[in-house]
Amino acid sequence: MNEKNFKIVADAAELNQAAAELLVKTAAAAISERGVFSMALSGGSTPKKLYELLASESFREQIDWTKTHFFFGDERNVPPDHNESNFKMVNEIMFSRIGELPQENVHRVLAENPAADAASDYEQTLKDFFNNELPRFDLVLLGMGADGHTASLFPESSALEENVRFFAENWVEKFGAYRLTLTFPVINNANNILFLIAGVDKAKVLGEVFHGSLKKYPAQMINPTDGKLIWLIDEAAASEIE
Ligand code: 6PG
């Protein structure tokens, strides 16, 4: 594990403040270098506060939204108005509150369609944006489940083996449903990968992710080819990490 990019903060509020500051810096660097900032968003509950912060007075002015492109690291196979939808969550908390963000800069997964169609459509969206090359996001935001999954790459699911497609449908037995997810080659090709992890329920698996000899969790397969991997963890989740 790369100890250098590892920060333990007191609680979820501090976690999201640190994440927002890091995001502003990363966006400014990308935009000054290449005129664009591309980011893959995470779902779940941990980043909600971060999305709120980014849309708030204290951060909204610090990002050039006209040059920022949002994608989804994963999505549920539901319509965009469904309570399970990551797009719905981010739209309500962030997109809808940032007037300066052009609609065409939000690249939604058409998750209302059958999973395989939604995945191949999004594959094309990624190809179009990244000129048919392996997508290289400036920042991929990830969470981690208590089972060690990340994005929608769940233990023992087929997408763990996918190393050609950029984005894939992934049957998740425990939900009896498809999820839609970026694959490891795309995530690991990012300039920056930021894990945002909070809560005591993550502590046990995080201890194993950091110190376990076996690579048995999807989160352990996140190793950037030549980008940076940053772990932002609150004290509750870090309690089993030496
Ligand atoms: C999702 C996420 C998922 C999430 C983890 C952690 O669509 O649910 O992308 O990978 O990051 O499940 O979720 P919490 O932040 O809610 O613990």
Image: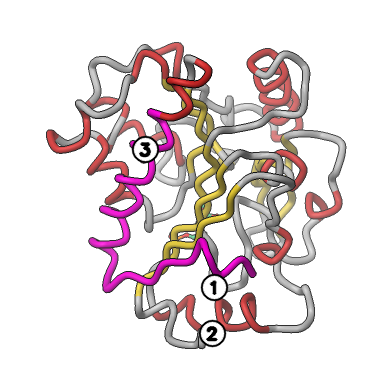
Between disc 2 and disc 1, whose residue precedes? 1
Front disc: 2 or 1:
2
Q: Does the magenta stretch include residue 22?
A: yes
Q: Range of the magenta residues? A: 1-28
| Residue 174 to residue 227: above or below | below
Q: Is residue 20 magenta?
A: yes
Q: What numbered label is drawn on residue 204?
A: 2
Query: Which amino acid type is shown beneath numbered disc 3?
Result: Lys
**Residue that label 3 marks:** 25
Query: Contact, CB < 8 Å: mark 2 with mark 3?
Result: no
Tag 1 secondary structure: loop
**Is 189 placed left or right of 44 in the picture?**
right
Q: Is the residue under label 3 in contact with that under label 1 (CB below 8 Å)?
A: no
Which amino acid, by three-letter code, is at mark 2? Lys
Q: Does the residue labelled 3 lie within 8 Å of ligand 1?
A: no
Of the image marks 2 and 3, the number of the one nearer the N terminus:
3
In the rendered structure, the answer to whether residue 205 lies left or right of residue 217 reads left
